[in-house]
Amino acid sequence: MDYRFPAQARDRLTQALAEVDSIHDAADIVFWANPAADDLHRTGIGAFGQLPPAFAHLLALTSLHTTVLDSGFSTYLRTRRTELPWATRALRAAGMPRLAAAAVLAARDASPDSPDDPLDRFFDDEHRTLAEPDQIRRPTGDRADDPDEIYDINEPEDFEQRVLDYIRANLDDFIREP
């Protein structure tokens, strides 16, 4: 199934995305209010693999951003852990490689030593990032290893603007061509 908007909606979608200043509003437009995506609303992380890259990245970053704002990165790691590979790819695509690295390093530091960790393969794939822990800023003092602090100190102030710029530049991922 194709969840993108029809080609004739390009101008309206372009205008709508130009007017938003929140990634949550952008996700509402392209996903939650998109009738073509109704069957994906309850799919969870499985929806990401069925969408074009910028579309999936917007959803992954909206989920990450909402959870971090509401209760911190450590909560994201507890409740949405399996979304982390999608979120880090999305952060890199949106021009935030340092925040992606911080998320990987903080997640690895906070991971339980378990043979059943669903992120083991992800961490194997991120071996270069894990080998260069000095590429991120670290908090000082007794919170130096706190995942929330590591994420927060590396999050750029213009996080949402970067995501919006990225999705606007990749509008074709949201539009079906005739």
Image (tube, rainbow, N blue to C red):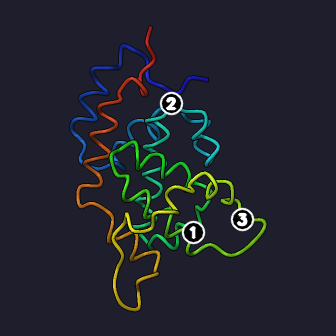
Q: Are marks 2 and 3 in contact (CB under 8 Å)?
A: no
First in sequence: mark 2 vs mark 1 = 2
| Kind of residue at disc 1 | Arg
Q: Which of labels 2 and 1 is toward the front?
A: 1
The answer to which of marks 2 and 3 sits earlier in the sequence is: 2
What residue did someone put label 1 on? 108
**Separation of marks 3 and 1 at Cα, in angstroms:** 11 Å
Instruction: Judge from the rendering whether residue 42 lies leftward or rightward of residue 7; answer left or right.
Output: right
Nearer the observer, 38 or 90: 90
Name the residue at 62% across, 72% down. 111
Indicate the position of residue 113 as horizontal and vertical percent values.
71, 75
Name the amino acid type tagged 2: Pro
Residue furthest to the left: 19
Residue at mark 2: 52
The spot of residue 114 in percent (x, y) is 75, 72
Which residue is pictured at 27% across the width and 20% down the height? 11
In the picture as drawn, the residue positioned furthest to the bottom comes out as 142
> In whole angstroms, how far apart are the C-alphas of marks 2 and 1?
28 Å
Q: CA distance from mark 2 to mark 3?
A: 27 Å
SS at circle 1: helix
Q: Quadrant of the N terminus?
A: top right
Q: Which residue is mark 3?
A: 117
Under mark 3, the amino acid is Asp
